[in-house]
DNA sequence: TACTAAACGAGACGGTACGTCCCGTCTTCGG
DNA sequence: CCGAAGACGGGACGTACCGTCTCGTTTAGTA
């Protein structure tokens, strides 16, 4: 998540302000809430952070990378407490993720940076490292826990395991994002319950394919 | 899909050129392919279309609405031929949708306009009318056909029917979009087979919730 | 002053509306008063006159010519009543001219069209015919009358006569315009009295040069 | 003549380029010569000066103020060498002024900015400070010098002195401008001789009024 | 009375310039 | 050497008018 790529050895001159970094990210989130992605400007963020534009550009190459870093930290909130059953775990994480997507800063930023990433490989990598992998880990943990509980059979073919994990991840994350941002309908308990039922009911079938 | 919201009654003055409309939309798609969403400019589109910038602004209020209209027509290609089974139908439509999302004009545009729509209600309506509802219809048709075949029980509670249709729509569309654009992994036959299996396997469970 | 250059012989079809002509010129004057020269637009004039833009362009080639025609008629007000002495005549006509230049429509338009005319020969001709010659006639009349009264000697060399007439015209018109528009100071009775004294006192000397 | 109205105290940040200032004014004069006032555009001037449009707008609020500054410097050329007599001094300065008015950049610009100034008080002030007062000084110097020579009586009433100075200024400047731009006739030696004779002959009378 | 041809209103058209906003870079000064 | 301040070249924006055009609709003077 950090910005400085290669700090030179000798470390001479005035050191960079660590406070500035956090002030900038905080200012970025505030600007996202207030203005949304497309109206957010580097100059405005600099102004809010009480920092010169030069300081921003010294740390981030462009708006996209800055926003990814500013938003990524929010995804650290996602947790997977053991609620005793696969279905409860799924429902819990889906609701968490949905409530994260309701926050104006994520709502406006997430799809925007994904859109940009279709033409910007370094950005895609940054998103993957900062956001996607962080979410995916939850799927792995949930699956492993369900296997330990015996809710799922212990699959031994690692290819199948990865394929199903990937599928579940895209289905869960995709469905929530689509529901929240594209359909623009509420991700409420009833919808989550149905989604969980679908997943739990279909998991077995999905694992027997291929 | 048309641009004129409120056509005045008397229809006086020189009528708008229908050729210009099509030239502009075509130029927009070309610019999307070549430049991507964020580098596309109104002036460039006008130039490609052999049209003055004012002519664009007379028809579309901004880049977002123009792009939605330009891309919307591509979604007309989606069809649901009867392949004999629910699962085959699902696999077919998912592959169709995936191949649509691989086209550079949709890939770069779709998430971008969705991102914008989180802060632009008219744009959201335009997307819903031009794109979302057009896709959703496929889910309805597929479900109805499966019921006629007897693959699915004839559900009589309309609330449940709608809820499941909506769920399936968000799951399918969301999973494909997420796989293609966020995970940036191929939507190949194996993945589609697993997704279809998951859906067919879980549908029954999803319908019994609520 | 009229606008139609070469009416074809047969004179068939619907004739041009004479009312429109006057409405347009009146609207032009109103727009000059309200907006000034530089903010006056053809579309606005058309709107005020209740006329289509095409109708304007059918009669006048551009804004400059339209404004000259609209303002020219105001210069018809200038008269030279016989007040019994050269000096009284001068004072009277100068005050008349000054009060004409105080009107907002002339104030804003006169210098503007003169400025345009430095790069537009047809416009210069139109100004000369519509405005300048109309004013110059007053100088000729005043001089002739003063000679009849015996206030000025009967000059017999026509070249000298013309030269002095021209000089007086430029001095009087120029001084008033400069005072009113460049210096932006009032053209009051005291100033006019001094100008008249200067002219009457210097006329004899001016006639003996060359 | 400078553009910055209120320089902030601390003088921080990168200072404005002095070279840019001169390049812009020079480019403005070149554009005036080539295109004339009405076809001169800010973008074109910026291009000629090798400068971004924003740099123009950072210094001048609009085309009018820019052109006044660009042309004002030309009026510094006007001088009043002592030629030994009032009449010779007048003839000299009038010819100087006339030749200045023949230059295409002044010819096209002067009346245009005066026309604009009838509806723009700040512009009028700028013209007065940059151009008018600079010319008026010549009248004062010439009159004082003539008094020192004994050609004119030493007038002791300051009100009369000012009034006559003002009158002479408007008469001389106005007559030359009107001859050159409105009548569009040459300001040659013969005409100047007559004008000077008129002034010298009438000055005494003008001073006795009021 | 009907025909015809021009003028009419309306408004879309290709185009130019506007003045503003933001970009990402640079230049200065002070810490 | 860092950092603020802010000017710089550049590019796109969305708007305003330009002067032209294409419609369908009057409106006279013939025929």
Image (cartoon, coloured by chain):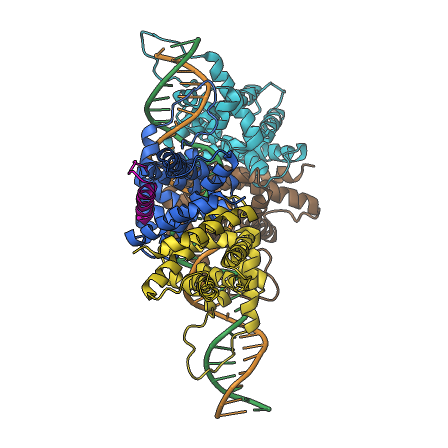
Chain colours: A cyan, B brown, C yellow, D blue, E green, F orange
In the image, residue B14 sits, relative to residue D59, either above or below, namely: below
Q: Which residues are magenta?
A: D79-104
Q: Is residue B127 magenta?
A: no
Which sits in the foreground, D192 or D106?
Answer: D192
Q: x and y percent of residue D194 in the render? A: 34, 53
Would you say residue B51 is visible in this rendering?
A: no
Q: x and y percent of residue B106 in the render? A: 44, 45
Mostly what secondary structure, the magenta segment?
helix
> How many circles with numbers are drawn on the protein?
0
Which sits in the foreground, B53 or C189?
Answer: C189
Would you say residue C148 is visible in this rendering?
A: yes
Tell me what residue is drawn at x 38 percent, y 23 percent.
Answer: D14
In the image, residue C59 sits, relative to residue A110, either above or below, namely: below
**Quarter of the view holding residue A5:** top left
Q: Is residue D83 magenta?
A: yes
Q: x and y percent of residue A67 in the render? A: 48, 27
In the image, residue A158 sits, relative to residue B40, either above or below, namely: above
Which sits in the foreground, B100 or C146?
Answer: C146
Q: x and y percent of residue A190 in the render? A: 67, 34
Looking at the rendered image, the quarter that the C terminus of chain B falls into is: top right
**Quarter of the view holding residue C81:** bottom right
Tell me what residue is drawn at x 32 percent, y 37 percent.
Answer: D80
Left or right side of D6 for E9: right
């Amino acid at each position: 998540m950090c910005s400085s790529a290669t700090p030179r050895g000798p470390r001479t001159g005035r050191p960079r302000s660590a406070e500035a970094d956090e002030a900038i990210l905080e200012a970025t989130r505030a600007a996202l809430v207030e203005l949304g992605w497309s109206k957010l400007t580097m100059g405005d963020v600099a102004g809010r952070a009480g920092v010169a534009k030069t300081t921003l550009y010294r740390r981030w190459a462009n708006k996209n990378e800055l926003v990814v870093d500013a938003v990524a930290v929010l995804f650290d909130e996602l947790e997977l407490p053991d609620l005793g059953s696969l279905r409860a775990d799924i429902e819990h994480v889906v609701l968490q993720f949905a409530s994260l997507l309701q926050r104006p800063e994520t709502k406006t930023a997430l799809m925007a940076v994904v859109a940009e990433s279709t033409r910007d490989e370094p950005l895609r990598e940054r998103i993957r490292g900062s956001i996607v992998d962080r979410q995916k880990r939850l799927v792995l943990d949930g699956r492993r826990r369900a296997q330990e509980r015996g809710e799922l059979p212990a699959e031994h073919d690692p290819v199948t395991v990865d394929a199903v994990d990937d599928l579940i991840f895209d289905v869960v994350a995709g469905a929530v994002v689509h529901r929240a941002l594209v359909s623009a309908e509420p991700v409420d308990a009833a919808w989550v319950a149905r989604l969980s039922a679908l997943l739990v009911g279909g998991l077995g079938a999905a694992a027997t394919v291929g």
